[in-house]
Amino acid sequence: MLWLALHLPLLPLEVFTRGGQSPSNAQAIAITSSVESSATVVAVNRPAQACGVIAGMSVSVACALASNLHTLARDVAKENATLSRIAAWSLQFTSFVSIAVSGEILLEIEGSLKLFGGLTRLHQHITRSVADLGFNASIACAPTPLAAQWFARSRMNLRVQHHDALRHALEKLPAALLCDNETTRNLLENFGARTIGDCQKLPRDGIARRAGQRLLTNLDRALGVSPDPRLPFVAPQTWSAALPLPAPVANAEALLFAARRLLAELCGWLAATGHGVQRPKFEFIHEKQIVTIITLELSSATRELDHLSTLLRERLARTELPCAAIEIAIASGRVTPLASRNLTFLPDSAGQVESASRFVEKINARLGANAICGLTPHADYRPERAWRACQPGFNSSDSAASSQIPTLSHTRPLWLLTAPRPLRETNAAPHDDGPLSLLAGPERVEAGWWDGQHVARDYFVARNKAQSLLWIYRERDITARWYVHGFFS
């Protein structure tokens, strides 16, 4: 087996700040262990580090070093929820993901290496993707889950694949990783055991008596001598997430940066569960609990991040916020199974349908839901009434009315005039910049007596002097006037 561990050292800070782009001149922020005066600093951002504030420092000392320091109490519940969403997102890379008690996320990736082109490519892909989510992560691989955790926790981005190299790599790690209390750490320090390699040289019986059996158990689990079972993470059936903004945002388009990070989480979960989303809902929370809601209406389910981001950008461009937003929330809504499809070297009909569908969705997002419509045949012999407007992508063959559409004996043109145009007549012959030659016809259309829009016409295909084909008709009444109704070419 091969395990990949994600260690997120700044998670307490990033659950509050990853919604912004963190410019270099941002306010100094520190996350504290509690709201009490005796609290300590848990995590800091770069502006706070530049002032000398570090993790483990008391809040009073930190405020003395940085007069403009903004402190936030640690939110463990929000961290756990974020870890669960990252674990769900990670399932797109492997079928087995586990959340460790210490906060690391473990992926069993042995069976995924060939799919992603080897360990190096998979490691690079996950590293880039985690950064796109807005997290600083230390990533390491090892044949055992505990060893991978230790490497990641020590910021040693190693990729150890074989047990032969594992023992040698573990020897360099600090001995403090073997124990979880200060007393045992001091005891190992007194023994002169500063690394795991030093501990391996000590008698096991003596270590067990003085430091406890747990230390040796952890060492054996890391080496793969003892089993180390992990509980699998199960992806949720629905997905929702919220992201606070580091500062109020009044420009709707500026919200896309934070929203894209949540969308990346959503798309990862969709890929892991094999689903697509069709009506994702975005909520932009403002001060005084005012909420702006945007729902994307897609003609077909998708899980592609770039497409969803493009649609949201178009909607945000025409959205006016009532006031500055302080938080973004996204809910997947109802999801549908999305089967994968094989790619082809040459364009095919499926790709053309998908391109047209995305074009329609983009226009609707930019101009509004009713900006574009489709056409479907309607059971009526009258040409101007033989169609109806419908939702783009409507398939008339799926409706019961399609079986009632009249079968026509002649070809009709695709280009019909909004209203028939009268033609000049000379000696009862139709003229349009010259005499017209009748090539085919007549096709008699007599209908509409049931709705008060009665027509009685004889249609012909005619050619003008420019060799264009016209669709003309003559009224079957006492006037017998000629009209042009459409064009073939």
Image (spheres, helix red, strand yellow):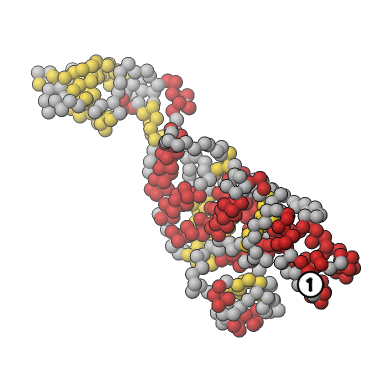
The location of residue 486, given as percent across then percent down, is: 25, 27
Above/below status of 101 relative to 114: below
Which x, y percent locates residue 442? 24, 15
Tell me the amino acid under the disc marked 1. Answer: Ala
Which one is nearer the viewer's eye here, 385 or 271?
271
- The answer to whether 418 is drawn above or below residue 464 in the figure is below
Q: Which residue is mark 1?
A: 193
Residue drawn at x 49%, y 59% is 257
Front residue of 417/436: it is 436
Q: Tell me the quarter of the picture where residue 222 sits.
A: bottom right
Determine the secondary structure under disc 1.
loop
- Label 1 Cα crowd, 10 Å radius (few <14 / some 14-19 / many 20+): many
Q: State which quadrant residue 79 falls in.
A: bottom right
The quadrant of the picture occupied by the C terminus is top left
Identify the residue at horizontal 44%, vertical 28% (top origin): 396
Q: Position of residue 342 (x, y in %)?
A: 52, 36
- From the viewer's perspective, is 435 left or right of 178? left
